Image (cartoon, grey):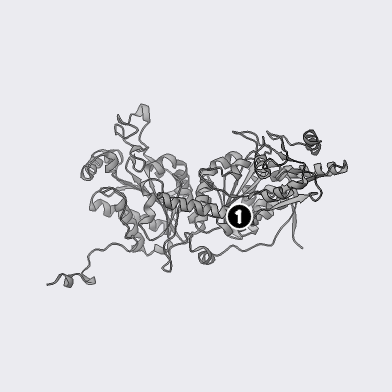
Amino acid sequence: MDIKDIIKPENIVYQKTKVLTNNVMHYCPGCSHGTVHKLIAEVVDEMGIQEKTIGISPVGCAVFAYNYMHIDWQQAAHGRAPALATATKRLYPDKYVFTYQGDGDLASIGTAEIMHACNRGENIVVIFINNAIYGMTGGQMAPTTLIGMKTSTTPYGRQADLNGYPLKITELIAQLEGTCFVTRQSVQTAAAARKTKKAIRKAFENSGQNKGTSFVEVVSTCNSGWKLTPVQSNTWMEENMFPFYPLGDIKDR
Amino acid sequence: MAEKVLKKGNEVIALGAIHCGCDGYFGYPITPQSEVMETLMEEKPWETTGMVVLQAESEIASINMVYGGACCGKKVMTSSSSPGMSLMCEGLSYLAGSELPCLTANIVRGGPGLGTIQPSQGDYFQAVKGGGHGDYKIIVLAPFSAQEMYDFVGLGFDLAFKYRIPVMLLTDGMIGQMMEKVELRPQQARLSDQEIAQRYGSWATTGKTPDRKENTITSLALDAKVHEALNHKLQAKYQEITEKEVRFETLFCEDAEYLLIAYGSMARICESTIEAARAQGIKLGLLRPITLFPFPTKEIQRMIPQLKGILSVELSAGQMVEDIRLAVEGKIPVSLFGRQGGMLPTPVEVLDAFKTNYI
């Protein structure tokens, strides 16, 4: 049998969603961003909402998220994505609007914007990548950096008396009346990625039903910033991040 | 006959927005401009024209909501006063860098810092020279009456969309709080989503349809060559605006030997100064810039041969006077009369200042 006899449409078991572009991603090998991008693109494709989806990219490594999906994008100033999303969704109520933000963007400089957008119950989706470090600027301390964790601005490890405590922003967000779905997931295994995709799908469906703000945290790796191999990063995340940032739904109504 | 109302300058900014078919207002309270949002909330335009009105959590959020709305090709605006406008400068830089249309209004109060809630023109530099980071300009309109506050909302949006550039109404607490008769215009319909997609679909985030490529609004370009090209494009646009959009008004300038240059509330006071001067046989004229960027440089230069001197009259320590001096290039004397801290001079004080400098 020739290989051409096998490569036929009826034999396809998996193919890249057409919502993803063919651009080579700039993310480091082992980074979680690429997986999460793929999951979002698949959800948008499967729900048939490509024409209705507007993404807001952050400042940070994912600033270039707009290079990887065939949808309309707005590139926000650092931390302000929820403000852009608020206006966009209110001006286009039939559109699906999501922000894609890292921990520095969402949980440090953008705390006011995320809190108030969630508290108003804006019918948007928030994808929150928490890798406990600033990736793009070269590995500085993030609001979610764990105690003892070494970064370029905590070279001896984060100390509570010097640097304050890691911020469990997702638990805070869950307290807000405007949020309908708040969950914390990960993508280090195929099983975890499937759960995250389900959560993203639910978030987009909530938006379509105007149920309020849906917030999906993805506990992620930054092996370059953490100075570990991709495999070591996954293990380190499971052993250190998950105990402090436990996975699962925090709120679903 | 057109409807006439007696309203504050701030109130008619709100009416002007509704009547010109504005899609969204996002703001945060600050004295002396809070009447803009208060009037909008009272008018409830979301029930009539469908306009969105939202009180944001801060000026930073307000301008970024405007940024999001402008990305969508919608007619969106905000208003604030000096300390709030400082917070908005980051967002304005993004809007300018991304070539987006929007309208802002700065009802200036005295600074620096928390300053005072009294009128000032101390934000001229911030408005005209950029304010935020990077090489950018915005169109700055300086209304001097409630009627102009109303009219310039529509004009501002027209210019904003014509050039894809942020436009600012730069005025002060005096014009914002003063009640005057204002002639209203008929209600203009808001554009439908389909109309917006047709007009602005080449760049706006209206949703990627199969007939076009995805649109990305960004001011980021890490490649130096690409980024310089973007800057050159912006500068070419500012040059075109400088050539085509200068607006000003003159009073008694035909035979003037001396010239007052003043905008906004100071121009109102200077009108009376000119009358008093003429009654004393002094050939004094008034040039009132209506656009501060672009500045009426050429008009000033055209008048130089007939002039013996210019007095810049400002509610600041001397900001616009620098642009006048750049225009005059040392050919005739240019002096300054400025009051600060919310102090408004009388017409006679301005005349005395003029005489001290030139007579």
How far across and how far down the image is residue B215, in percent? 44, 60
Q: Residue furthest left?
A: A1
| Residue at the (36%, 58%) spot, across then down | A69
Is residue B44 visible to the viewer in this orientation of the structure?
no
Q: Residue furthest top?
A: A161
| Residue at the (61%, 45%) spot, across then down | B128
Classify residue B52 by image quadrant. Answer: bottom right
Quadrant containing the N terminus of chain B is: bottom right
- Identify which amino acid the numbered label 1 is placed on: Ile
Classify residue A172 by image quadrant. Answer: top left
How many labels sit on residues? 1
- In this view, B299 is above or below A241: below
Q: Nearer the viewer, residue B337 or B300?
A: B300
The reply, left or right, for residue B354 in relation to residue A31 is right
Mark 1 packing: few (<14 Cα in 10 Å), some, or many (20+)?
Answer: some
How far across and how far down the image is residue A88, in percent? 49, 55
The reply, left or right, for residue B87 in relation to residue B293 is left
| Residue at the (33%, 64%) spot, across then down | A18
How far across and how far down the image is residue B305, in percent? 75, 47
Q: Nearer the viewer, residue A70 or A204?
A: A70
Could you tell me which chain the residue with mark 1 belongs to? B
Quadrant containing the C terminus of chain B is: top right
The reply, left or right, for residue B13 in relation to residue B273 is left
Q: Nearer the viewer, residue B228 or A199?
A: B228
Q: Is label 1 in a helix, a strand or a loop?
A: helix
Q: Nearer the viewer, residue B323 or A131?
A: B323
How far across and how far down the image is residue A48, in percent? 37, 65
The reply, left or right, for residue B241 in relation to residue A161 is right
Classify residue A72 by image quadrant. Answer: bottom left
**What residue does disc 1 label?**
B241
- In this view, B15 is above or below B119: below
